[in-house]
Image (tube, rainbow, N blue to C red):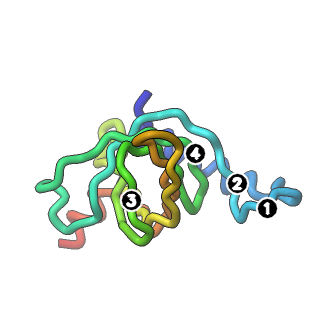
Amino acid sequence: MKLSGELFEEIISQLVSDSGSMQHNKRREPRVGVRAQGVITPWTLDRAAVKGTVVMIRDLSPGGICIVSAAPMQRGFRFVLQLQRVQREPLLANYEVRYCKLLSSNIWAVGGKLVNLNSTEADSSAA
């Protein structure tokens, strides 16, 4: 299953509204497990010139993501998760890698902090 922009927005809005029920959890924000594919690209001005990489999305929170990747990523590396939306421009979620942990041979868990969330509609109007 691919994660759509609409589903992403719905999950995040539900997590934000449920954040009061986390009194005994050590995490700063609630998270939800997700088993979906996403496409990431390095955070660059010319995204069209860079081929996307398919990753598995493990979990989401209002402030972050955990993906499973076939390649390691350095702490501080920035990437864009692009999510398609029905009859709208794609949703772009910009993340910065906070950790990268080897799970097994050539399989890495990569945690990213959400830097900003926007759409290409906003990007094109700013130009």
* Horizontal relation, residue 15 to residue 122: left or right: right
Image coordinates for residue 83, horizontal then vertical, percent: 36, 45
Q: How many marks?
A: 4
Which callout, 4 or 3, points at the residue further toward the start of the chain? 4
| Tag nearer the camera, 2 or 1 | 1
In this figure, which residue is indicated by the disc labeled 1? 26
The N terminus lies in quadrant: top left
Cα distance in 3D space between marks 1 and 4: 16 Å
Which numbered disc, 4 or 2, marks the residue closer to the eye?
Answer: 4
Which residue sits at x=30%, y=38%? 87
Direction from residue 10 to residue 16 in the image, left or right:
right
Q: Identify residue for label 2.
A: 30
Q: Amino acid at mark 1?
A: Lys
Q: Left or right of 117: which side holds 42?
A: left
Q: Circle 3 is placed at which residue position?
A: 73
Tell me: 18 left or right of 117. right
Q: Earlier in the sequence, mark 4 or mark 2?
A: 2
**Where residue 79 sits in the image (x, y, percent)?**
35, 60
Q: Residue at x 53, y 44 (%)?
A: 103
* Vertical order, 53 against 72 (above or below): above
In front: 107, or 81?
A: 107
> Disc 1 versus disc 3: distance between alpha carbons?
26 Å
Q: Give the class, few, some or many, for how many residues have Cα within 10 Å of label 3's Cα (few <14, many ≥20).
A: some
